[in-house]
């Protein structure tokens, strides 16, 4: 079992694979929409790296020794993970890679250290910029060719990387599992609720769009919600 690996073997194989999966994303500008407030804002996105795949169950178990997923499979995305668990994973992976953890964890939440060089969740602006990969379209291709969603998923997650990637080499940005982002959704109204993006295996086509935003409490877990790694450059 991957959970029995020691820290030396993690450094030798797992960490190398993680670094190889990180894709450089160029600087850009993204328009974020808040439909509740009927607001539109332009956000500049700095160059960063983002993983070509969502975090898999094999990687999650290699770092934490646990696998909370309902739909088991080493190369399927990890799901049923809360936001708190996702950022704790990022910190543990950063420590294993001898990088500075990005999150200061507290009993009542977590604070992002934007100067740290470790792994983190993408901001939602970074996520949407990376998902669109220079396109203004609602999806980066025909949905059946790029995503696992309600019409083709057979009510389950699937192994990552089986559908076509976007123009920047990122797989499963839409469908398969939703992905936690670092951001608070709307703290004035929803307090500590965090954003997740991308649509999942149970969603209809209208749920798997680059602009879609959803939210939940950072303790929330469900079988179509996972996460993807990012790093500042």
Image (cartoon, grey):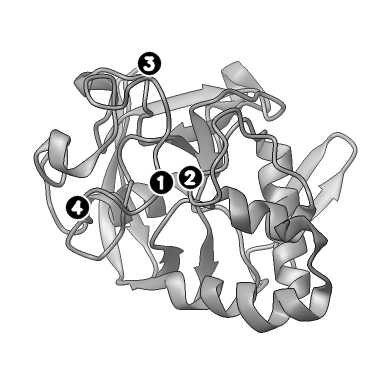
Is there a contact, CB below 8 Å, between mark 1 and mark 2? yes
According to the image, label 1 marks what residue? 159
Residue at the image point whose x is 20% and y is 56% from the top = 166
Q: Residues within 10 Å of mark 1 (few under 14, many from 20)?
A: some
Q: Position of residue 146 (x, y in %)?
A: 20, 44
Q: Secondary structure at mark 3?
A: loop
Q: Nearer the viewer, residue 211 or 20?
A: 20
Report whether 229 appears left or right of 104.
left
Gap between marks 1 and 2 measured at Cα = 4 Å
Q: Position of residue 55 (x, y in %)?
A: 53, 52
Q: Nearer the viewer, residue 124 or 187?
A: 124
Residue at the image point whose x is 41% and y is 56% from the top = 53
Q: Secondary structure at mark 1?
A: loop
Q: Residues within 10 Å of mark 3 (few under 14, many from 20)?
A: few
According to the image, label 4 marks what residue? 164
**Res. 97 in view:** no
Which label belongs to residue 76? 2
Q: Residues within 10 Å of mark 4 (few under 14, many from 20)?
A: some
Q: Nearer the viewer, residue 33 or 198?
A: 198
Q: Position of residue 207 (x, y in %)?
A: 29, 22
Gap between marks 2 and 4 measured at Cα = 16 Å
Residue at the image point whose x is 39% and y is 68% from the top = 46
Is there a contact, CB below 8 Å, between mark 2 and mark 3? no
Which is nearer the N-term, disc 3 or disc 1?
3
Residue at the image point whose x is 33% and y is 46% from the top = 173
Which label belongs to residue 16? none
Is there a contact, CB below 8 Å, between mark 3 and mark 1? no
Report whether 140 appears left or right of 196.
left
| Front: mark 2 or 3 | 2
According to the image, label 3 marks what residue? 36
Which is nearer the N-term, disc 4 or disc 3?
3
């Amino acid at each position: 079992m991957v959970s029995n690996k020691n820290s030396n073997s993690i450094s030798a194989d797992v960490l190398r694979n993680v670094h190889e999966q990180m894709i450089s994303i160029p600087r850009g500008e993204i328009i974020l929409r808040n439909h509740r407030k009927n607001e539109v804002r332009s956000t500049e996105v700095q160059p960063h790296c983002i993983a070509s795949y969502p975090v898999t169950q094999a990687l999650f178990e290699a770092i934490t020794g646990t696998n909370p997923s309902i739909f088991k499979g080493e190369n399927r995305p990890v799901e049923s993970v809360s936001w708190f668990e996702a950022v704790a994973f990022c910190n543990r992976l950063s420590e294993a890679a001898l990088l500075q953890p990005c999150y200061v964890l507290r009993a009542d939440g977590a604070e992002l250290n934007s100067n740290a060089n470790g792994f983190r969740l993408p901001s939602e602006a970074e996520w949407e910029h990376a998902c669109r990969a220079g396109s203004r379209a609602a999806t980066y291709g025909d949905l059946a060719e790029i995503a696992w969603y309600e019409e083709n998923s057979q009510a389950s997650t699937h192994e990552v990387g089986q559908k076509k990637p976007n123009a920047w080499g990122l797989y499963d940005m839409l469908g398969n599992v939703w992905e936690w982002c670092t951001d608070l959704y709307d703290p004035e109204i929803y307090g500590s609720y965090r954003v997740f993006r991308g649509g999942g295996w149970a969603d209809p086509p209208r749920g798997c769009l680059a602009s879609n935003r959803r939210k939940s409490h950072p303790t929330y877990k469900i079988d179509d919600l996972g996460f993807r790694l990012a790093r500042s450059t």
